[in-house]
Image: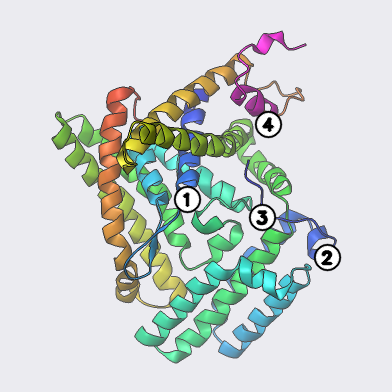
Amino acid sequence: MNTRDIGYVALFAALIVALGIVPAIPLAAGVPITLQSLGVMLAGLILGPKRGALAPIVVIALVALGLPVLSGGRGGVGVFTGPTAGFLFGWVAGAFVAGFLAQVLDQRADGFVKRAVLLSLAAILGGIVVVYLGGILWLAFFTKLGLTKAFTVSLPFIPGDLAKAVVAALVTVKVRDALSIERK
Amino acid sequence: MIDGLGTTGTSPLHRLAPGPKLAALAAIATALFFLDDARGLVVAAIAALALLRSTGRSFGRIARDLALPIAVIAAVGLADLVFVDAATAAQVVPRLLALAFLAHAVVTTTSSAALLDTFERALMPFERLGLIDAARASLTLSLALRFVPLIVEEAAEIRAAQAARGLGSHPIAVIVPLVVRTLVRAERVAEAIDARGFPPPRNSNTSRREFVSEATTGNDHPHEHP
């Protein structure tokens, strides 16, 4: 980790925080979706597995310091004892997996469309499948809902996250065309 | 900068050091998971609320602070009631409320600076083992907090520029230049921090906060300082 890596990690942690300030978009069912998970996907896809996973770790450390850095001004250790904390911890593994897949898949593709499709796949597997796995396991344990029910309750958020995965992939292709950053 | 949620005060909880408070929270949270008696859990929730009230926060203020977590807990209770049974809901809701009240009592009585110091001390054993560099870890946290307002400003500028050219604010059209510009800025800040000789030598009294404030205020002449 040189100082430049620290700058990148801090920047993406800040981006995740800043995306929480953007007003949440209320879904038809009244469930709000926020853009913070878009920041997590971007951290993985642009920075790669290790530095990508460090960005949400920094956000979690800021939460632990009692700073209101999560959407809706949430922060403090209370977040860690809440029923949805699994999604927050899932960000770390999710960014790592998205970053790892991006590293592997992006080298084998050329052309805007092909890269965007493969990066969307990386964002979906890391930023949705892995994050939800952590979130649903935690929710099922915390609320005694059971896995199936915990999954059902989480379903309304998936369409929004799919849209974010595609946006993250498109942004990543364009950003990496403009700047050369090694994924690590 | 973002202000912490902690407030100053003179209640017993305010005076307790952050380390013991966090340890107690972790111990009580674990114990609550092994307690399955609904009545016991209700008593725990009421006791936790009384503890939170003892910090000097009014019930109205507590309700406002915790509106979002309480809404989530209500939704979880409803889901338990519908999908599982009333007995489970009667355990889960008071348990989660007790946890929310206790954790909020810790958060509101501990300043972020005190927590940062505790955090650095907690990292020391790992630093001795060579696993973590405390100076770099706290530099990363300080930089992240410094970057948040920069990103918000930059996003507003990009939107204004695009509106001036008659472009609508399309998310991708805003995020791409935002990420590119702020990445370039992060690189420049990193160079500025290196130019100031980071990491500081062990016996130096230059704090990481000084590195961050100097490097991000656009002062590109580090050596002209007295």
Residue at 67% x, 82% y is B46
Give the chain of mark 3: B
Numbered mark located on residue B5 in the image:
3
The three-letter amino acid code for the residue at tag 4 is: Arg
Would you say A113 lies left or right of B220 here? left
From the top left corner, tell me how far across and down residue B41 is, in percent.
Answer: 60, 83
From the top left corner, tell me how far across and down residue A25 is, in percent.
Answer: 38, 58
Residue range of the region highlighted in magenta in the rendering: B210-226
The three-letter amino acid code for the residue at tag 1 is: Gly
The part of the image, by quadrant, that contains residue A182 is: top left
Query: How far, Cα to Cα, is label 3 from label 4?
Result: 20 Å
Would you say B56 lies left or right of B45 here? right
Determine whether label 3 and label 2 are within 8 Å by CB.
no
Query: How far, Cα to Cα, is label 1 from label 4?
Result: 24 Å
Residue at 69% x, 27% y is B210
Q: Nearer the viewer, mark 1 or mark 2?
A: 1
Is B220 magenta? The answer is yes
